[in-house]
Image (cartoon, grey):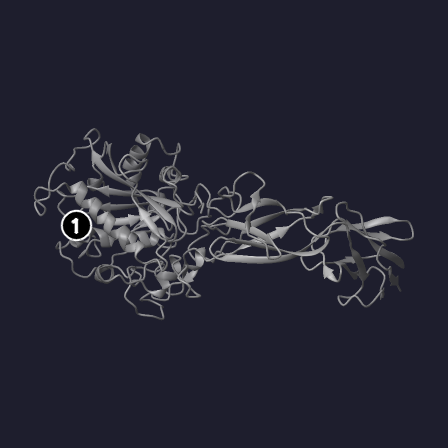
Amino acid sequence: MTRGRRHRVGTLAACVVLACAALGASAWLPAGASAAGSSGPRTAGPVQPAPPVLVDLMGRGAGAATPQLPIGLGALPGARETAAFAAGRVAVGVVFLQSDGSLMPSSESWSRGDPAYPGQSRRQLVLAKIRSALDWWNAQSPDGSLDVFMPAAGSYGAPQTVKVGYEPIRMDVKYGWKGHPVLSDAAWRWQAMSKLGFGPGAKNDKPYPETRFADRIRARNDADWAFVVYVVDSLNDKDGMFRNQVVAYTADLFGPYSMLTYDNDGYHFDNFDAVLAHEMGHVFGALDEYAPPSAGYPSTGDLTSGYLGVRNRNAVSGGTTDLPCIMRGSNDTLNAFATGQLCLSTIGQTGLRDTDGDSRPDVVDTRPAFTTGLESTDAGGAVSLRGAVAERPRKRGVISTGVYFRRDLSIEVPHDLRYRVDGGAWQALAPTDGAFGEPSEGWTLTTEPLTPGYHALYLEGTTGEMVDRTRSLWAGPTPVSLELATNAAFTKKAVTVAPGAAARVYVRSTSGGLPVARLAPLQLVRLSDGKVMATVTTGENGVWTGTLTPARSRTYEARFAGAGQFEAAVPSDPVTITVR
């Protein structure tokens, strides 16, 4: 099966306490932090949320317009859609930040060991914790098809250490746009991304350079989605927090990056995997569920989020359920990680919901649509047809915090496409461009020689689920009968309308009493002067319907003007539209 390859992001923001007011991002407060921002004792006790600190590197705040982003063709994710839901292959690019002391004194070094883990590489300890978080999410997939992974050593996007001139853990909050604090992570992020070949724009993060880096990781690792995890060393830091009391955060819903410190203040390194698992919930579209620390904070039960637009019903404030969940924050997150628990709200928001209970998440439980074109037959009775098959992606929902997706997405493409005639053997459909692998594909087929007359063609294919479609075909020269009427039952041949009013007309094409689908071109002809009023094609049921608005009383008939195997011996019976 061929999967999608692309992604994009929505609005930009990141905030303290695992989410961002009206912007849809996330971050963690340190355990034991006070509202004034002091570090407090480094314990794993319950978190007392502090007011959120808006992080807006692009100079856009709550209520700012969502940027217009390019939209790709088809249903596959585009280059800026970093992630949409927890399904498919998700590549995680891990970047260890290391200060080289060139712009400020360096106080941390990944080469130093942690006294709590003597003789062990801290990078390897972190990677083991990251694998634990990834495995935790993989275990949540109802069909086991979610594969969140780090690219292997030697692969593009494999874990790496990047040197920057700043010491990230010692950076201060800078006050910028409209007086809101702006976390200065751009200072070290832009340096790191530039060294990896993804420098920022001249002025800001439009889009994040991590988006382009993640897109490259996705493409090079045959993944559907990708995001970046920055790890900031804080071993020697007195409280394991950034200077504005932040421990961990995610840039925005659906990525493209998360930022975590080594020891997570009061959560300690032992819970690094639980903290990351919570942040990954935001990457997959889930909101926080703890009580809002300030008015307008996006963790209430009246909000919707995730690709499917699922209500945040497990929120402490305004929710309707009270279930253990990774998105509850603080000790609730730690306990949910230990027990592997997701609430129904988070299951829906991350796209893991399986409404019909078939073990396939709704977001990939999709079916392709077949269309068929005009057929022709050769002298030996072989019938040739052309058509198309297209993925029908799950419809996106409404996200309260902004517009992140401007079209429906799927990571599936039609595959296992085949056909057979009557009771014959199944044969593979041939793509018109040489290979299937896009959300919408053309196909052609030519049957073996068939006996003159009616035959049944069976088409079969799948994206998430198999679809069977049957259509009629005829071998040899086939006379087609045309009917024109002014009612759907094809019993009325005349109708009277007021001046300027439209009359509905119906055309039906059949052969041997069976509908002839997609018959074209058919012409509606005005008999008084032979003018063609419309050129139409019948639908899958062999029927076309439309309207005519004559200026005066007129009589019409339907004619077949095509070529190939279908022939109309005579035009349809005429119908008359009287204007009175």
Q: Is residue 182 left or right of residue 520?
A: left
The residue sitting at 25% across, 57% down in the picture is 50
Q: Quadrant of the C terminus?
A: bottom right
Mark 1: which secondary structure?
helix
The residue sitting at 77% across, 45% down in the picture is 563
Q: Is residue 497 left or right of residue 119?
A: right
Counting from the top left corner in percent of width and height, residue 362 is at 44, 59
Counting from the top left corner in percent of width and height, residue 140 is at 32, 58
Q: Is residue 251 left or right of residue 395?
A: left
Q: Is residue 394 above or below residue 158?
A: below
The residue sitting at 33% across, 64% down in the picture is 343
Pointer 1: residues within 10 angstroms few (<14), some, or many (20+)?
many
Mark 1: amino acid: Phe
Q: Is residue 82 above or below residue 32?
A: above
Q: Is residue 154 left or right of residue 224?
A: left
Q: Which residue carries the number 1 mark?
A: 269
**Nearer the observer, 570 or 449:** 449
Q: Is residue 52 visible?
A: no
Counting from the top left corner in percent of width and height, residue 432 is at 59, 40
The residue sitting at 71% across, 47% down in the picture is 381
Q: Is residue 451 above or below residue 46?
A: above
Q: Residue furthest right?
A: 528
Counting from the top left corner in percent of width and height, residue 416 is at 50, 50
Q: Quadrant of residue 495?
A: bottom right
